[in-house]
Image (cartoon, rainbow, N blue to C red):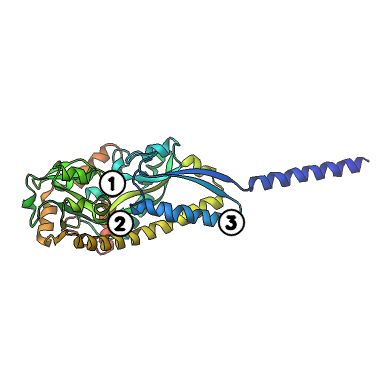
Amino acid sequence: MGGTKFWRGAVALLVLAVVAVSGSARAENFKMTAAAGHPPIFLWVKLLHEFYIPEINKRLAAGGKHTIAWTEAYGGTVAKIGGVLEAIEEGIVDIGFVGSIFEAPKLPLQNVTYVSPFGTADIGLVTKTIAGLQKSVPAMGASWGKYNQMMLTGAALDTYHIFTTFPIKSIDDLKGRKILAPGPSANWIKGTGAVAVAGNLKTYYNDIKTGVADGTLTFTTGAWGCKCFEVAPHITKVNFGSQFAGGLSINKDVWASFPADVKEIFLTVSAEYDVRFAKGQQAAADKLLGIMVKKGAKVAELPAAERKRWAQAIPNIAKAWAAGLEKKGLPGKAVLKGYMQGLAKAGVKVPRDWSAE
């Protein structure tokens, strides 16, 4: 009898152990809210809605264990432009597109491209270079963690040009003009005689139409989305360079709750988002510029000499930016030098090396 009791007890313990193990690997049903300040007309949000979320669901379904019930909140319905970082930090949303240009005080190192204009139009190269810096410069990658989140994937915008109500043949034509330039890009017109005016893609059209501004520094796909080319039909191709805009970020507590296989799916799909975005953004920019011309826009290429003159005319905003961050204990110089070196290694010839002065 004693032996029977012993084996019954052993079997009971074995059953409990099996239950415990199976329980730790059991299927999970997650609920997540994805947000963006911009509407899905912009590719970084469109891909989140049409590719990223469906692809994650597809791969989860193939695994046969976990599911995610999504709530999608775009166009500022839950988090406004410039408010997604905080919404993720506070757990109001779980994942979203954080525009680093609108978070310059909190994510200063991520804005290195905006203080070193006249770089490259290669969207993929900019994204790859910034991703490399976030790995090689610890403080840069860790900056997301301060706000209880981690970055999953980055995105860079197609190169910036200038859209105005008047033609531009030289930088002298900018004197006295009011130009919409958000955040760090306001520095691009210092020394040209133009006046920077605050704004964003949602305000550009009305601001130009009502005379608040005479034009804007923006990227082609953004100009199409806000239709500012209709009120500022003179498009001068300056090529300020593709700009790192931010990326998809996820709440760290949410990330920690994921099993390893779910994390792997997110990381894999995030890498694919990078590639799809770079190719799609450039293709869209080329196509939309052609449509703008058909709709009456006038496109002119700023002569190389004038582009160099413009680059030399503005103060070394990058040097000042890096020095300011160094005083705060942040590696501004290392990030700036790393970015310029990354472009140089890829064969990009810039009219001004901001890190060499």
Q: Secondary structure at mark 2?
A: helix
For residue 5, side relative to residue 253 (left or right): right
Depth-wise, is mark 3 or mark 2 nearer the camera? 3
Residue 241: x and y, percent? 23, 56
Q: Which residue is mark 1?
A: 111
Looking at marks 3 and 1 on the same chain, the residue that comes earlier in the sequence is marked by 3
Choose mark 3 or mark 1, whichever is in front. 3
From mark 1 to mark 2, how far is it between C-alphas? 12 Å
Tell me the amino acid under the disc marked 2.
Val
**In the rendered structure, which disc, 3 or 2, sits on the residue that comes first in sequence?**
3
Viewer-proximal residue among 77 and 259: 77
| Residue hosting label 3 | 63
Extreme-front residue of the structure = 295
Q: Nearer the viewer, residue 279 or 252?
A: 279
Please tell me which residue lies in front, 319 or 305: 305
Task: Decide if residue 60 is in sight here.
Answer: yes
Q: Position of residue 321 (x, y in %)?
A: 22, 43
Q: Is 311 on the left or on the right of 65, as rendered?
A: left
Q: Residue furthest top?
A: 90
Q: Which mark is residue 276?
A: none
Q: Amino acid at mark 3?
A: Gly
In the picture, the disc for residue 126 is 2
How far is the residue under mark 3 from the one under mark 1?
Answer: 38 Å
For mark 2, does the 10 Å Cα neighbourhood hold few (<14), some (14 to 19), or many (20 or more) residues?
Answer: many
Question: Which quadrant does the N terminus fall into?
Answer: top right
Asked which secondary structure carries label 1, the reply is: helix
